[in-house]
Image (spheres, rainbow, N blue to C red):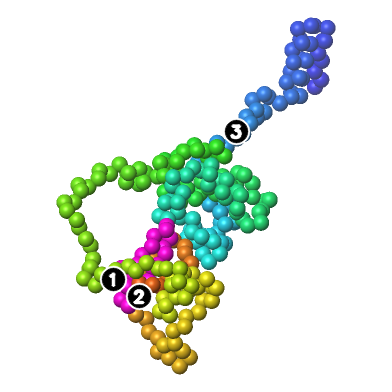
Amino acid sequence: MKLLVDIRRPGLALLLSLGLAACGSESPSSVSTTQSAAPVVTFASQVEAGAEAYATNCAICHGANLEGSTLGPLLSGFSWVRRWGTQTPTLLLGNIQASMPPGGNENITEEDYLNIVAHMLQVNGVDGVTEALTASSNFVIEDSISRMVAQRNRPEPPAPEGLTVSGNTEDFIPFIPLTDAMLRDPNPADWPMMRRNFYAHSYSPLDQINTETVKNLQLEWVWNMHEGDSEPAPLVYNGIVYLINPGNVIQALDGKTGEL
């Protein structure tokens, strides 16, 4: 059957034209006009990205959990917070960008560095930050660690009455000041500086231990050092071992017993 249309009728021609036009084009509702919005960067998202960036670029030297290794110092814990807690993310970022990794790596972007800093802060207890870090984030790091804030706000205990001394003082050994002559020619039993003398000989004139007696050495005592990375270089003077701990803590130990 043939359908004949009289195009001389204006109204019908107009309707036919609109119908053909509608068939030849997609409905506006079928065209997606929604554009994907850019992801919002937050401190939490930086922490997540920073964990991956750290694992790729830093963990091989500083440990998977920021615990440090023989290749790089630890980046977490009490000693790290003690050192960097009073600083700002801006200073920390600048320090890392200027020195890490040794020799530089052009593949690490500024965004990567910011993310790594966020990861480090989160691992060290920063829990009071929500906004994304920037190169100008200048808040004090420890002010965003709730446990540090709580510790500062803790009331001071009442002052003790009189003088309280902890430990045994019966065998107190008075300290004899070192002289230049003693440093130039140390007592054979002393080790008053790194490598023992100004010539850095690292040699002891004591002869009790030799190739025949070394097999008889036994462990006498053990002392637990403070948390942190360290390359101990103990000094020995007048029977006292002066042990340098992380955080610039120096302990004086009895060389015979290991008592503080």
Q: Please give the range of residues in magenta.
A: 241-260
Give the image quarter of residue 60: bottom right
Q: Check disc 2 and report its element: helix, strand or loop.
A: loop
Verify CB contact (< 8 Å) between mark 3 and mark 2: no
C-alpha separation, residue under disc 1 versus residue under disc 2: 10 Å
The answer to which of marks 3 and 2 sits earlier in the sequence is 3
Residue depicted at 45% across the width and 54% down the height: 80
Verify CB contact (< 8 Å) between mark 1 and mark 2: yes
Residue depicted at 47% across the width and 83% down the height: 205
The quarter of the rendered structure image containing the N terminus is top right
Q: Which residue is mark 2?
A: 239
Q: Nearer the viewer, residue 63 or 143?
A: 143
Locate residue 191, reporting x and y percent: 44, 74
What's the amino acid at mark 2? Gly
Q: Check disc 3 and report its element: helix, strand or loop.
A: loop
The answer to which of marks 1 and 3 sits earlier in the sequence is 3
Q: Residues within 10 Å of mark 2 (few under 14, many from 20)?
A: some
Residue lying farthest front?
Answer: 181
What's the amino acid at mark 1? Ile
Verify CB contact (< 8 Å) between mark 1 and mark 3: no
Q: Which mark is residue 37?
A: 3
Locate residue 108, reporting x and y percent: 64, 50
Residue depicted at 40% across the width and 55% down the height: 78
Work out whether 241 lies above or below 23: below
**Would you say residue 259 sits in the magenta stretch?**
yes
Q: Which residue is mark 1?
A: 173
Q: Is residue 14 left or right of residue 136?
A: right
What's the amino acid at mark 3? Ala
